[in-house]
Image (cartoon, rainbow, N blue to C red):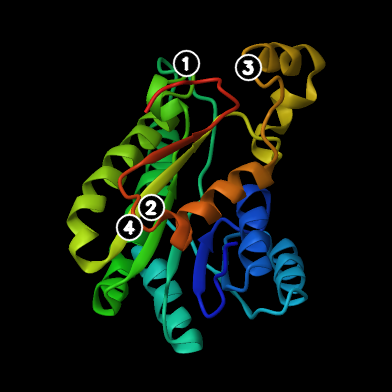
Amino acid sequence: MIDLKGYTSIITGSSRGVGRATVLKFAEVGSDVVIVYLKNQREAEEVASLAEAKGVKALQIRADVSSRRDMRGVVDQTLRHFGKINVLVNNAGIWERAPIHTMKEEELERTLSINLKGVFYGCQLVCQTMMSQRSGRIVNISSTAGQRGEPFYSHYAATKGAIISLTKSLAVELAPYGITVNAVAPGWVDTDMAAIPLSNKEEREAIISLIPLRRVARPEDIANSVLFLASDMASFITGEILNVNGGGVLCG
């Protein structure tokens, strides 16, 4: 059984979707949680209340993950409030359609900043504390798009591929300090991010037809995988990319 009692876990992009599900899974097993959100204050307050109802402490922090200053603030506030950081889950990200021949510079910059810089800053700033503790777990959220590419979302796929390389690089660099760094690579997940294609009956059927398990993931499916990698059950796993896609993409 997974037990994270006494842990403090930071989860970015956690007011809804996979991040919300991850907060609640961590709270169920005893971890205090830091809910990092950008716009959805009401949803952040709601998930904090649900987490606290499970007997843990929940801290809400509004921050732009693409800002190093904001992420420095997240780390500082967490340390002032809890005194330690055991787990970082880099979940915040965006998925915006942009054909390569019409992609605007601001579209490219926005995706690179949130999806890649946000993960980099989180890892960089949190690992300083984890190194002094000689322990820690970092779990990054990549995507099957980072492994096989995705037409019309090339900038998104590029960031998710970069997260895989970053994960493998940091796994080796931080291993001497007792820090593991892994990633979860989801396929289709039934969240707000994928609501438009999944709400169209024909598109949803076409998507499901390519998934051997014949369904899209629930947010909890991804959260369970993140929880496993953050737990002692995965203490000898680092630098791995855990594919959670129903068999839709079979690669490492």
Image quadrant occupied by the C terminus:
top left
Label 1, on which residue? 151
Q: Amino acid at mark 2?
A: Val
Q: Residue at x 76, y 67 (%)?
A: 46
| 3D distance between C-alphas at marks 4 and 3 | 31 Å
At numbered mark 2, what does the secondary structure look like: helix, strand or loop?
Answer: helix
Question: Which residue is under mark 2?
Answer: 119
Discs 3/1, front: 3
Quick one: SS at disc 1?
loop
**What is the crowding at mark 1: few (fewer than 14 residues within 10 Å), some, or many (at least 20)?**
some
**Which amino acid, mark 1?**
Pro
Label 3 amino acid? Pro
Query: Residue placed at 53% from the left, 80% from the top?
Result: 6
Task: Name the foreground residue: 108 vs 185.
Answer: 185
Residue identified by numbered label 3: 212
Work out whether residue 67 can be spotted: no
Q: Could you tell me residue 164's position as x and y percent? A: 33, 38
Q: Whole-percent x and y of residue 240? A: 35, 42
Query: Which label sits in the foreground, 1 or 4?
Result: 4
Q: Tell me if residue 230 comes above or below residue 109 in the rendering.
A: below
- Mark closest to the chain's N terminus, 3 or 2: 2
First of labels 3, 1 by sequence position: 1
Left or right for 122, reference 141: left
Mark 4 vs 2: CB contact within 8 A: no
Quadrant holding the N terminus:
bottom right
| Contact check, label 3 and label 1, Cβ < 8 Å | no
Q: Mark 3 falls on what kind of element?
A: loop
Image quarter of residue 54: bottom right
